Amino acid sequence: MNLANSAIASESAPARRAVLRGLALSGLSVAVAACGSAAGQSTNTPDSGVLVPPDLPKTPDGALQRLMAGNERLLASKTLHTQNLDSIRQHATGQAPYAQVFGCADSRVPVEAVFDEDFGDVFVTRTAGNVLSEPTVGTIEYGVVALNTPLIMVLGHQNCGAVKAAVEAMKDPGKTPAGALGALVSALVPAAREVKDRGGDIYAAALEAHIRRTVATLEATPVLKESIAAGRLRVVGASYDLATAKVTLYR
């Protein structure tokens, strides 16, 4: 676990829950209230006050099934959603996402397109190489506590530049970039080191190892751990193939 993840794990759970619930429930600012509000009509109102359209999944298994079905539609060229101004206007008053995706910042992995979803359906967080930081974890926690998303998918992708850089830095520390970029690459090096003697495609193996480590870190985070234990939340890892658009779950 890197330094950022160590700090995440040691954070005071009661204090963080208090902050997040304050954001979700007390309406401290107009901006946060707008983020937590929902679009359209609903017959269901969770404890957070977020209105959930009745046709969206509300369980971890249902959310995962819908995400993967969307990817299957993309692969079959039978997508349902188009991004246009009318759709933007329909979702302008709020959001009620049914799942979260923590993806890579790579411009070739647009989450809504990968899963054939519309505006407001998926709560997306992205960093290069799926590297966690304290604010990133806070964003993911917000999606759980304030928006009641029952699923978090950590979505890496094949041929990830950050993973490749980490493998090269593992082989030769002198190739670690300077500055903040170096810190990002260094956060991926433990995964590369974990698989260095396995043989085969070390880049694919390092990606999987890193995604699995990230899933484990999120599962151990106190705020998320509480929801997982209650059966309200699941965290899964997956990989996206840039050449085929297929999403493969890490079982």
Image (cartoon, rainbow, N blue to C red):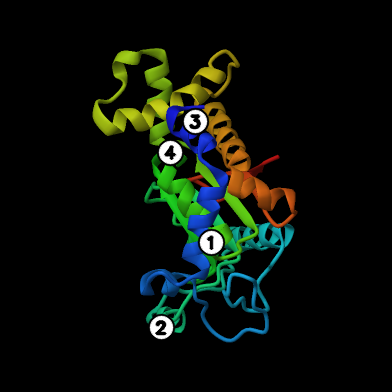
- Nearer mark to the viewer, of 4 and 1: 1
The mark found on residue 129 in the picture is 4
Measured as percent of width and height from the top left, residue 20 is found at 50, 58
**Element assignment for label 3:** helix
- Nearer mark to the viewer, of 3 and 2: 3
Q: Residues within 10 Å of mark 1 (few under 14, many from 20)?
A: some
Amino acid at circle 3:
Ser
Measured as percent of width and height from the top left, residue 237 is found at 61, 43
Would you name the residue on which mark 2 appears?
Answer: 89
Would you name the residue on which mark 1 appears?
Answer: 21
Among numbered discs 4 and 3, the one appearing first in the sequence: 3
**In the rendered image, the vertical position of residue 114 relative to residue 224, given as above or below:** below
Q: Is residue 141 left or right of residue 31?
A: right
Residue at point 61% right, 36% down? 216
- The Cα atoms of the two marked residues, 1 and 2, are separated by 28 Å
- 3 and 2 marks in contact (CB < 8 Å): no
Among numbered discs 1 and 3, the one appearing first in the sequence: 3
The mark found on residue 6 in the picture is 3
